[in-house]
Every structure is written in structure tokens, then in C-alpha cells.
Amino acid sequence: METFAFDALGTRFEVRTAHQLGAGVREELLRETQRFDWVWSRFRPDSLVAQMRANGGRWDMPAESSALASLYARLYEVTRGAVNPWVGSSLERLGYGPHYELVPTGPPEPAPLWDDDHVWEGTAVVLARPAVLDIGAAGKGLLVDRLGAILDEAGHEAYVVDGSGDLLHAGSEPVRAALEHPYDPEEAIGIVELARGALCASAGNRRTWGDGFHHLLDARTGAPVRSIIATWAMASDAMTADALATALFVAPGPVLAAEFAEAGPEWLQVFSDGHAEGSQIFMEGLFS
């Protein structure tokens, strides 16, 4: 077993494989991580997304943009606008910007409407004016998938890609994953098994500041979600699981599971009043 750890997207990634990676594969993993960060990060000043913040017009994005655009269009529709990739301006207004100011410049403000002034189709983004594109709902999961594809291409049949808790698993032996307590990261509220697929989580306690602000917003209002405190989702790929974990903050689990049925989703929502709702695999894994 080999573990290869590195920083990506402002957090820690680990790739665990049954066999040695080799220097060439490690270098390819790092190259893809750096390329992805340069395109999609709104926290680095030289990224394409950062350039969009200052300039409107047409932007030609890389190939993975097509999958992201399609996913966000579905999320926007099924959540009735609550998940929206233009929420970046709302996040930065509350202080969650490229310099981590963590000081709001005004009250919450709704995100621009999908395809109202800005259009994102396939690999083309057309901005009527400068805008802040934020793929935080699915971006980390997509990078996890892309790293998994590199391992597949290199012939690795058993591995775990761990993007700071967003997991992609391949192999015949399932892995057991603890569900972190939303109020105490040293404790767990349950355990689930992950076999040949992805498990992702979202929680309001991960990035908090000021008077109860966190990074999980309802794009329709620009305000943090208060009724749900933690979510988990399983799916066949990490991009979908990551997106569902975010969408579970603003939409019912059964509705999302029906919309993304082709990915075989499982889901769990933990509410601020202490109760939980979810699919059978998660509910059975909760500690009583």
C-alpha cells in the first residue's frame, strides 16, 4: 500500500493505492491538480475564474466544463435556483473572497439568475459583465474523479482518492468511513461502507466566520442555510456525490435522488434540531 499526499484546492489530498504509483504517475497527478486549480480557483489571482471577475465577454473553458455546465443546469432546475454557479458574488459579499477577508461588505445578496445575463453552455462561458463563477458545489469532487481517471489509465485497480473527506473508491474490498459529528470533529455519528463509488460530505462547521456565517448559501437569498447542519451523499462518481452533498442543504433528499437516479445516489441530512433523514444505507449506519 502506498500513500501519496499533497495540497490541492486549499486543502489536503491523499491517494492510496494497493501498488506503487511510480514517479510518472505522481507527476501526472500533480500536473492535473495544478492545471485544475489554475482554471477554476477563485482564490488565486491568475486563474481563469479570477480573470472573469474583472472582465466580461466570452471565455473558452477546458473540456471538463461541459460536464460541469450540464450538472449545474440540472441542479439549478431541481433546487429551484438554490444551487447556482454564480453564487460566488454572494460569497464574496459576505467576506469569503480570495483574500479570506471574512468581513461582510453588506447584507446577503441573491446570486445572478442562471442564464439571465450570463450563459454557460458546454465549454463556453459568455458574460454580460464581470462575474464570479464558483464551482464549489462540485469542483472538488470533479478533481477527485479526474485523479481517479489517471489511476485507472495507469492500471491501478484498487485505490482511494481522498480529497479532504471526499472519497472515490475502486477495488473489491469496501472501505469503512466514519460520519463526522457536525459539532465535534473528534466524534462520529455513524459509519458507512463505500464500495466502488464516491462518498462526499458538506457541513456548515468547516468554514465559519463572523456572526454565524458559513459557505453553504441558498443562492436565491445569498444567506447561509440554517435548517441543515451536515449532509452526506454517495454516488457512482465524486462530482455527482459532491454536488448532491451541497444540494441536500437546500432540497429534499428524495427529490434529488430521483433526479440523479442514474448515479445510484444514497443520502443523509442532519437537521439543526437534531433529527436526521436519509436513505436506508445511511440511516442503518447511524449510531443510536
Image (cartoon, rainbow, N blue to C red):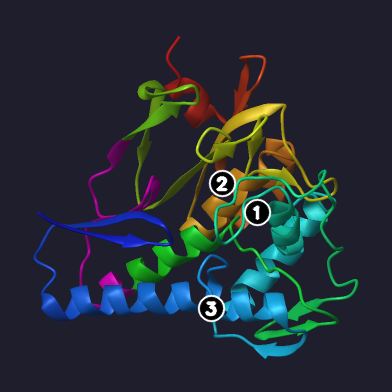
x, y percent for residue 136: 58, 57
Q: Are marks 1 and 2 in contact (CB under 8 Å)?
A: yes
Residue depicted at x 58% and y 35%: 204
Please tell me which residue is depicted at 67% across the width and 30% down the height of the picture. Answer: 211
Going from N to C along the chain, the mark reached first, 2 or 3, is 3
- Residue 124: percent from left, percent from top: 70, 86
The residue positioned 77% from the left and 77% from the top of the image is 130
**Left/right of residue 115 with respect to residue 279 in the rendered view:** right
- Marking on residue 47: 3
Residue 161 drawn in magenta: yes
Find residue 165 and report its image quarter. Answer: top left
Marks 2 and 3, how far apart at CA = 32 Å
Coordinates of residue 153 in the picture (x, y in percent): 28, 78
**Residue 51 makes an appearance in the image:** yes
Residue that mark 1 sits on: 260
1 or 3: tag closer to the N-terminus: 3
Residue 132: x percent and y percent? 70, 68
Question: Marks 1 and 2, how far apart in space?
Answer: 7 Å
Instruction: Say which amino acid is labelled 1.
Output: Phe
